[in-house]
Image (tube, rainbow, N blue to C red):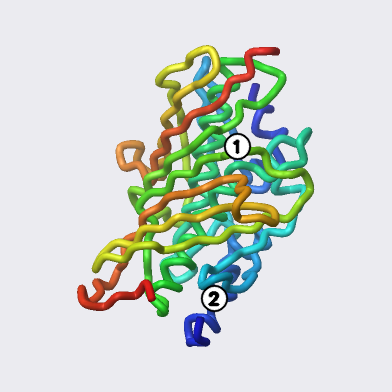
Amino acid sequence: MTDILNCMPYARFLGLQTLVSGDEITVIMPFADKLIGNPMLPALHGGSTAALLEMTAMAQVAIIFPSPRLPRPINVTVAYLRTGRPIDVFARARISRAGRRVAHVQAEAWQEERAQPIASLTAHFLLDNQG
Amino acid sequence: MQESFLTTILPQLAAGAAHTGALGFAFDGLHDGEPRIRVPWREDLVGDPDSGVFAGGLVTTLLDHIGGLAVWTALDTFQPIATLDLRVDYMRAARPRQDLLAQGLCYRLTPTIAFVRAWAFEDDPADPVAAAQSAYILNQTREPSTRAAA
């Protein structure tokens, strides 16, 4: 199951690592210089955090609803809550509701303290129930 | 649009950071006053390896970034800004192994907030792969009387 992200080239580009406990996945984006968006602060590029959240949500959906095809995002909304500092980022997602075709997912990313998220995501995914 | 200091540094703002450089972003000019970024297709930026299509996260990053360029273009100056939030609608699958373009418009500036719409597409902005709606906070409050959306 942890291979879900490992088989995605972009997840490898971001260096994402996964931890699965039961049916919950935690994704870690270890700090790397190439994730920096603002060299002056320095700060992570918001897009790298957004991509981490999106792939965490996708992996969580894939774990709960195994399918030969990856769940496809319909839309994602990301709120940036705090500056991403040049250290590791962690993310977890929760499926709020899943119907026959669509899953609604929420995810949060944090750094040192889970209670101080740096970004949150709300997304809809199209489920492939054919497989 | 008139040549200004800002327009001379747009290529740097598009691709100059470590992340945007690593993703291969390249400034692709102003089109009807809207900045455009090109991302050359690359195998390591793909989501589903069976599809050969850019990952959703790459598209989100691109739309976030072009939005920032649209804000600076509307302000006609560089100043620190931060994305508040960003919504991306994925309208269709991108075409496999093709470069992606993004273009954005800051359609409203308040003294503290910039509102942006942006699109990602292969060649026709009217046939977008994804569309974004985003808000950015300006770190330096503007004079309320200044209208930047000229």
The residue under the point 69% across, 53% down is B122
Q: Identity of the amino acid at label 2?
A: Leu
**Residue A17's disc number:** 1
x and y percentages locating residue A123 in the rendered image = 46, 32
Asked if the residue under mark 1 is in contact with the one under mark 2, i.e. CB atoms within 8 Å, the reply is no
The residue under the point 35% across, 53% down is B84
Residue A106 falls in which quadrant of the image? top left
Dot 2 alpha-carbon crowd within 10 angstroms: few under 14, some 14 to 19, many 20 or more: many
Q: Nearer the viewer, mark 2 or mark 1?
A: 2
Horizontal arrangement in the rendering, residue B148 relative to residue B41 (left or right): left
Q: Residue tagged by mark 2? A: B10
x and y percentages locating residue B134 in the rendered image = 40, 52
Residue B27 falls in which quadrant of the image? bottom right
Number of numbered markers: 2
| Label 2 SS | helix
The residue under the point 68% across, 62% down is B24
Q: Quadrant of the N terminus of chain A?
A: top right
Question: Quick one: which residue is furthest to the left in this view?
Answer: B144
Residue A19 falls in which quadrant of the image? top right
Above or below: residue A6 compared with residue B14: above
In the foreground, B36 or A115: B36
Q: Quadrant of the C terminus of chain A?
A: top right
Horizontal arrangement in the rendering, residue A58 relative to residue B108 (left or right): right
Q: Identity of the amino acid at label 1?
A: Gln
In the foreground, B62 or A12: B62
| Label 1 SS | strand
Read off the chain for label 1. Answer: A
* C-alpha span from label 2 to label 1: 34 Å
